[in-house]
């Protein structure tokens, strides 16, 4: 019975990683200074990639930001953060573009209310 499960699960795991299902997740980190952290996860490759986080406030575009970070070879994730204090309230979109692509590789939407982050279903 266990071998049958492995026979089914191993190709499924391989197919999922081979498809490159990229994603970005955001959360509030409560340390001495509260931060809004978004982490981009992708498949690992053997070369460096340029990852651009695009933070967009739907109600307050003056709070938007774009930041590019190098995702080192053989790494599967990278993150960007914003300080929560002074951040615009309301709806946000964080999209991630890889190696200068115009199409986002991943998108995350959430609503910021005080210090609470409520994820939006895509």
Image (cartoon, rainbow, N blue to C red):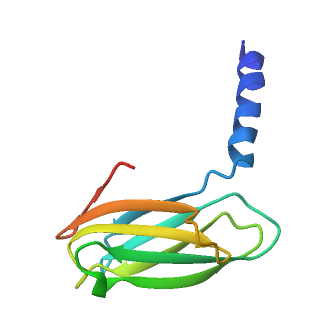
> Between 1 and 12, which is closer to the camera in this rendering?
12
> Between 2 and 102, which is closer to the camera in this rendering?
102
Question: The N terminus is located in which quarter?
Answer: top right
Query: Among all residues in the image, which is located at the extreme right?
Result: 46
Query: Among all residues in the image, which is located at the extreme top?
Result: 1
Image position, residue 4 (x, y; %):
75, 16
Query: Among all residues in the image, which is located at the extreme left?
Result: 114
Image position, residue 7 (x, y; %):
78, 23
Q: Is residue 83 above or below residue 42?
A: below
Give the residue at x 53% y 69%: 96
> Between 88 and 114, which is closer to the camera in this rendering?
88
Q: Would you say 121 lies left or right of 117 here?
A: right
Give the residue at x 70% y 33%: 12
| The image quarter in which residue 58 lies | bottom left
Give the residue at x 56% y 78%: 52
Q: Would you say 101 lies left or right of 44 here?
A: left
Q: Would you say 35 lies left or right of 72 here?
A: left
Q: Is residue 90 above or below residue 81?
A: above
Q: How many marks?
A: 0
| The image quarter in which residue 78 lies | bottom right
Give the residue at x 50% y 66%: 39
Q: Would you say 119 lies left or right of 21 here?
A: left
Image position, residue 85 (x, y; %):
24, 83
Image position, residue 15 (x, y; %):
73, 39
């Amino acid at each position: 019975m266990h071998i049958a499960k492995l026979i089914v699960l191993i190709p499924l795991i391989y197919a999922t990683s081979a498809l490159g299902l990229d994603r970005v997740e955001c959360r509030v980190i409560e340390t001495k200074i509260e931060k809004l952290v978004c982490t981009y996860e992708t498949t690992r490759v053997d070369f460096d990639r340029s990852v651009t986080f695009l933070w967009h406030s739907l109600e307050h575009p003056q709070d938007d930001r774009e930041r590019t970070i190098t995702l080192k070879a053989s790494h599967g994730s990278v993150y960007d953060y914003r300080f929560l204090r002074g951040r615009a309230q309301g709806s946000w979109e964080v999209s991630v573009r890889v190696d200068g692509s115009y199409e986002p590789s991943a998108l995350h939407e959430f609503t910021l209310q005080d210090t609470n982050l409520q994820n939006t279903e895509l």
